[in-house]
Image (cartoon, grey):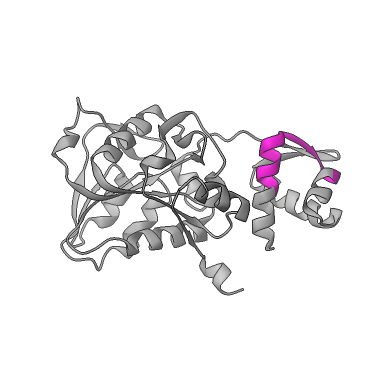
Amino acid sequence: MYAIERQQLILQFVQKHKVVKLVTLTNEFNVSMETIRRDIQQLAQEKKIEKFYGGVKYIEPVEGLIDNRLHEQLPEKVAIAKACASLVQDGECIFIDSGTTTYQMTQFLLEKEKLTVITNSLPVAFDLIGSNIEVIIIGGKVRHSEKSVTSNDFLFRFDHLNINKAFICASGVSIEKGISDFSLEEAITRKQIINISQTVYVAADSSKFNKDVAIQVCPVNEVDMIITDYALSKDTINHFTDKGVQLKIVKTNIENTK
């Protein structure tokens, strides 16, 4: 097992139990105390857990500014975005959500022909200016922290859009609560897009799984596929696929060199 995969399992274990002794982790994962300390140090540096003498406790996530999140798990996000872009065909009309994973799609779409991109992401729109891609940005309220536009039927006529494929981001993904986000306004916009799109993909790195945040966007059975990275544990993969959720697991360039 790679260290990154074990660290993800440790994080999920600590998230479930909230406070855990280090000796419990060594027994649970059948590794040495030295190995556990290295894993805990890495997770603590990423501010996902907090250390105390002899144990750790889970840090409940809060949404940071988009600029601060752009470089978090970047290889995973780029790999997921590349896989998303590979699903796009010439001549389609697609929606690209605001978020640091879907933002990475733009670099892989520039060679597409007769493509229309609808987005609520200002960075996505700015990246595509000057390309051959037609860009439609939904009208509404600018959310400064996310550099996104949130909207509703009063501000924007969603029913006029004909979207072949929508690529949605998520802050939390679970069987029990589905796709979730920190922002009510973002969730409302995503609900509208999901309702009118022919096919819906969720782009979410493995750290978002088995996590529920403030607002439910939709149940997992309302999306066609979730695209994520190779660090997702086998137990989590089985948990989702057993419930009929279609997953696409992608490898990063780092993993491909191992």
Q: Residue at x 39, y 56 (%)?
A: 104
Front-most of 62 and 145?
62
Q: Is residue 185 magenta?
A: no
Residue drawn at the location 37% of the way across and 35% of the way down: 144
Query: Relative to 175, is 100 on the left or the right?
Result: left
Q: Quadrant of the N terminus?
A: bottom right
44 to the left or right of 170: right
> Residue 103, position in %: x, y?
37, 52
Q: Residue at x 33, y 45 (%)?
A: 97
256 left or right of 189 in image: right
Q: Considering the whole magenta stretch, tell me its main secondary structure.
A: helix
Question: Which residue is located at x 70 percent, y 52 percent?
Answer: 42
The picture quadrant where one finds residue 98 is top left
Q: Is residue 190 visible?
A: yes
x, y percent for residue 54: 86, 40
Say if 5 sits above or below 119 in the image. Answer: below
Give the total of numbered labels: 0
- Measuring from the top left, give residue 39's x and y in whole percent: 74, 53
Against 237, residue 195 (above or below) is above
Q: Nearer the viewer, residue 112 or 125?
A: 112
Residue 7 higher or lower than 57, as above or below: below
Q: Is residue 142 left or right of residue 17?
A: left
Query: Which residue occupies the foreground of this view, 56 or 41?
Result: 56
Q: Quadrant of the C terminus?
A: bottom right
Q: Residue furthest bottom?
A: 257
* Residue 20 counted in the magenta span: yes
Name above or below for residue 118 compared with residue 50: below
Question: In the rendering, at what x and y percent does residue 22 appear?
Answer: 83, 44
Which residues are the magenta region? 10-23
**Residue lying at the far left of the rendered structure:** 160
